[in-house]
Amino acid sequence: PATQVKTLSELLLSPQAAMRIPNPVPPKLLETDKLKLKLDIVIGEGNYGKVYKGKLTDEQGNQTTVAVKTLHPVGDLEDLKREFRMMKNLKHENIVGICCELMETEKQEMCMVMEYLPMGSLKEYILENKERITTLSLLKFAMDIAEGMDYLEECRIIHRDLAARNILVKDEHSVKVSDFGLAQEPNEGNYYILRTQRSLPFAWYALECIESYKFSHKSDVWSYGVTCWEMFTRGLDPIDNLPTDPEELKRRLKNGYRLTAKSQCEPNIYTKLIRRCWDHQPSERPNFSEIKHIIRELRE
Ligand code: ADP
Ligand code: MG
């Protein structure tokens, strides 16, 4: 049951963020005609346009720092609308939240207003903190991502772009899944035509995705494995060892080639968690609920 949200800060701090109901009642989004948006610095470069830090002021004068994903003039508005439609229905503490309906910036660019995660992407965070970050902290991050992904599975959404660059760091102990630009909406039928021109993240993709464009929750599990690999190797085993040509990558994966973890990554985590996400057979890969269980065991 959704409580009436009155101010933006209430919306963002709402304890119901942890609500675990499939296809939940969307949170009440703030009406854009009553909001003032002011853009500050650029914090990310998106596939559509820039991501800014910004300040949102509501009718009562409450101010909240937000992240604003803009659509540059040549971008496709339908892509941004799709991403927004999906995200606005999601409410979970490990999924980045949306603040209001789509709105326009001062420069009349369409934009999507999200909660601001001050510590940026997990990819950068790992690189900056690789010397001091503990395995236990990384296991907590892995758990947060699995919680968010388990919730997405309940909502029947396939993310399709799970990678450290698309996980945002809230604080030293928690992260959230973000960037639904490639996500597949539920009930779309068998075909899904990708409108956007963005190139696909093959290095994160399961064999069946590269081979036959078959995406499923289990292909998200594969990408989850690559994301964990990025975390636990702390950026020390570069992913560019993988061939970039999809045909060559397909051949290598078919022959059993997988990313290895030479540095830093604990062998236990590699074999019991990461490697299991890359099973040839999707059905042999653990689902996100099993992954949470594996992480609990690894923590002990
Ligand atoms: P794209 O679809 O173009 O990849 P993303 O949604 O991944 O765009 O955003 C690009 C980058 O912008 C992220 O990697 C991150 O550094 C930054 N960013 C995006 N959303 C937020 C947010 N809510 N809070 C803080 N930084 C963000
Ligand atoms: Mg991204």
Image: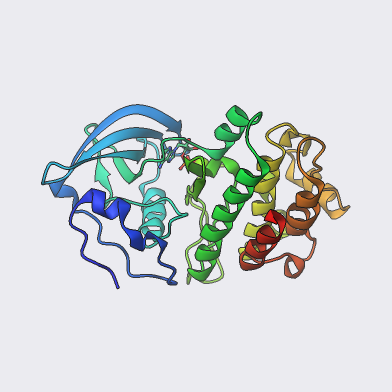
Q: Position of residue 145 (x, y in %)?
A: 56, 53
Between 244 and 286, the one nearer to me in the picture: 286
Q: Is residue 162 visible?
A: no
Instruction: Report the residue that reaches farthest toward the left.
Output: 60
Instruction: Report the residue that reaches farthest toward the front.
Output: 300
Q: Which residue is located at x 70 percent, y 65 percent? A: 286
Q: Left of 180 or right of it: where is 270?
A: right
Residue 68: quadrant of the picture: top left
Work out whether 67 lies above or below 89.
Answer: above
Q: Position of residue 247 (x, y in %)?
A: 78, 46
Work out whether 48 lies above or below 190.
Answer: above
Q: Position of residue 210 (x, y in %)?
A: 71, 53
Q: Left of 287 or right of it: where is 158?
A: left
Q: Which residue is located at x 37 percent, y 62 percent? A: 89
The quarter in which the C terminus is drawn is bottom right
Between 197 and 147, the one nearer to me in the picture: 147
Q: Position of residue 104 (x, y in %)?
A: 24, 41
Image quadrant, ligand 1: top left
Q: Is residue 242 visible?
A: yes
Q: Left of 1 or right of it: where is 78?
A: right
How many numbered marks, from 0 up?
0
Q: How is the image coloured?
A: rainbow
The quarter in which the N terminus is drawn is bottom left
Residue 135: quadrant of the picture: top right
Work out whether 284 lies above or below 248.
Answer: below
Residue 73: quadrant of the picture: top left
Q: Which residue is located at x 78 percent, y 57 percent? A: 272
Between 112 and 140, the one nearer to me in the picture: 140
